[in-house]
Image: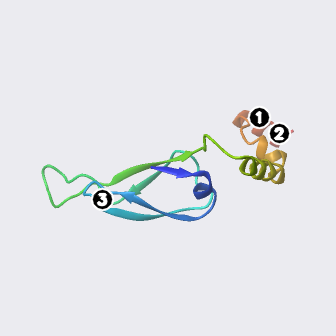
C-alpha cells in the first residue's frame, strides 16, 4: 500500500482496499518506516477446509517519494533537513559503528 512521506512521518488515516471489494480504515502511526507490515485480522482469504475461518490480510506500507517537486517544495525539504541536524543526516550508520561509538 503506497503512502506518502508526510503520512509516514505524521499520524494519518488511510483506507486499505480489502479482497472482498470493501475498505478498512487504518491509522498510520507517527514515524512509520518504509516497508512496515500491517496485519488486518480476519480480512484475508477464507480457509479452504473451513469457510467460516478467514485468514489475516498482510499489507506492506511503501513510502513513496515524489518524482517531481517545484522550487518551494524543494526549499521546504531543505529547511526540514537543516532543522533536523546532523544526527538525522547520519542515521544510516552501521550497527557496528553505533556500538563502537557507545563504548568509546
Are there few (<14), some (14-19), or many (20+) residues within 10 Å of tag 1?
few
Where does the image place residue 17, in percent across and percent down from the top left? 35, 56
Residue sitting at 14 percent across and 49 percent down? Answer: 48
Question: Alpha carbon of mark 3 to alpha carbon of mark 1: how far?
Answer: 42 Å
- The picture places residue 55, in percent across and down from the top left corner, at 27, 54
- Find disc 1 in the rendering and name its residue: 97
Indicate the quadrant containing the C terminus: top left, top right, bottom left or bottom right: top right
* Residue 54 quadrant: bottom left
Instruction: Name which quarter of the figure residue 101 lies in.
Output: top right
For disc 2, the marked residue is 101
**Marks 3 and 2, how far apart in space?**
45 Å
Residue 12, quarter of the rendered image: bottom right
The mark that comes first in sequence, 3 or 2, is 3
Q: Which residue is mark 3?
A: 43
Mark 3 or mark 2: which is in front?
3
Above or below for 95 versus 81: above
Residue 52: x and y in percent read: 16, 61
| Residue at the image position 76 percent from the left and 53 percent from the top | 76
| Residue toward you, 24 or 99 | 24
Check the image and report above or below for 71 versus 11.
Answer: above
Amino acid at each position: 500500500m503506497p503512502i506518502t512521506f508526510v503520512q509516514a512521518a505524521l499520524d494519518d488515516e488511510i483506507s486499505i482496499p480489502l479482497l472482498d471489494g470493501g475498505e478498512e480504515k487504518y491509522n498510520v502511526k507517527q514515524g512509520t518506516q518504509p516497508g512496515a507490515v500491517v496485519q488486518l485480522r480476519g480480512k484475508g482469504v477464507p480457509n479452504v477446509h473451513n469457510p467460516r475461518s478467514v485468514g489475516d490480510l498482510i499489507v506492506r506500507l511503501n513510502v513513496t517519494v515524489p518524482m517531481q517537486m517545484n522550487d518551494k517544495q524543494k526549499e521546504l525539504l531543505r529547511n526540514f533537513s537543516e532543522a533536523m541536524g546532523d544526527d538525522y543526516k547520519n542515521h544510516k550508520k552501521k550497527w557496528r559503528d553505533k556500538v563502537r561509538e557507545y563504548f568509546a
